[in-house]
Image: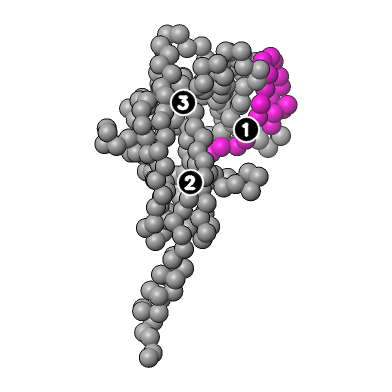
Amino acid sequence: MKLSLPVLTTLILLASCSGSPPAVINTDYIFVYSNDLVRGAVYEELNFFAQVEDEDGLEDISEISIHRDDLGWSWNLGPDEWVSFSKDGEDWIGSTGLTTGGRVPGGDYRLMVTDRSGKREDHEFRLKNPGVPLKDLRFPSLTYRGGSLRVRTVGGAGAAALWFYNDKGSFITEKYSPQGGFKISEFLNPEEVKSAAWVYLYVQDEAGGYGLRSGPWMLQEE
């Protein structure tokens, strides 16, 4: 029997997507309070990543979604929205800054990972909202003048993460800094100094089990 091209193509696609469903091996997440200096407001956000395995490779994953079933809403992320990385032979997928109306209620959540053939894996987890009154939060801060940065950490943090972006909003690099004053050239090479437009600071309150992010601070001086 001679197969027509459309039928043959369909069989090839089915064969290539006939492996096992994706597997969620582990999850890692942290609740974050984000101090938006542009809007003058504090938001609750979730940074969430999942260690995922798929016999057909990560490129076979079509969507990851995080559901709050009792409230009827979800975050749905495709390959263009998620961040993926490999560490020690482990593949991780996730996103930062997830929020709904500036809030992230605690409770039971469900992660669903779906591959291109429609096979999926569900994984449940419970999120605790630290419930810190906003007036009690103390955020890391920064001043920038004449090519120099002064970093102030909080909550007993020994160092802060500095996230640099260009004027198009594209991420440039991440650096770590203790509290104190530094030349920006200690963090960025000459090309990065030219392109860096703003920076965010991030620290973790280890005792409270949450993160604190603040910014952006502009780096392009008049």
Badge 1 vs badge 2, beta-carbon distance below 8 Å: no
Q: Mark 2 Cα within 10 Å, few/some/many (few <14, many 20+)?
A: some
Q: Quadrant of residue 13?
A: bottom left
Figure check: 64 above or below 191 = below
The residue that label 3 is drawn on is 31
Query: Of tags 1 and 2, which is closer to the observer?
Result: 2
The magenta segment is 170-188
Q: Return the disc, 1 or 2, that comes first in the chain's sequence.
A: 2
Figure check: 45 above or below 131 = below
What residue appears at the point 37 percent right and 91 percent down from the top-left corner? 1
Callout 1: helix, strand or loop? strand
Identify the amino acid type marked 2: Val
Q: Quadrant of residue 201?
A: top right
The residue that label 2 is drawn on is 24
Of 149 and 103, the residue lying toward us: 103
Marks 2 and 3, how far apart in space? 20 Å
Callout 3: helix, strand or loop? strand
Identify the amino acid type marked 3: Phe
Callout 2: helix, strand or loop? strand
Q: Return the disc, 2 or 3, that comes first in the chain's sequence.
A: 2
What residue appears at the point 36 percent right and 84 percent down from the top-left corner? 4
Query: Of tags 3 and 1, which is closer to the observer?
Result: 3
The residue that label 1 is drawn on is 174
Marks 3 and 1, how far apart in space? 20 Å
Q: Mark 1 Cα within 10 Å, few/some/many (few <14, many 20+)?
A: some
Identify the amino acid type marked 1: Glu
Figure check: 89 above or below 190 = below
Determine whether, in the image, residue 220 is placed left or right of residue 96: right
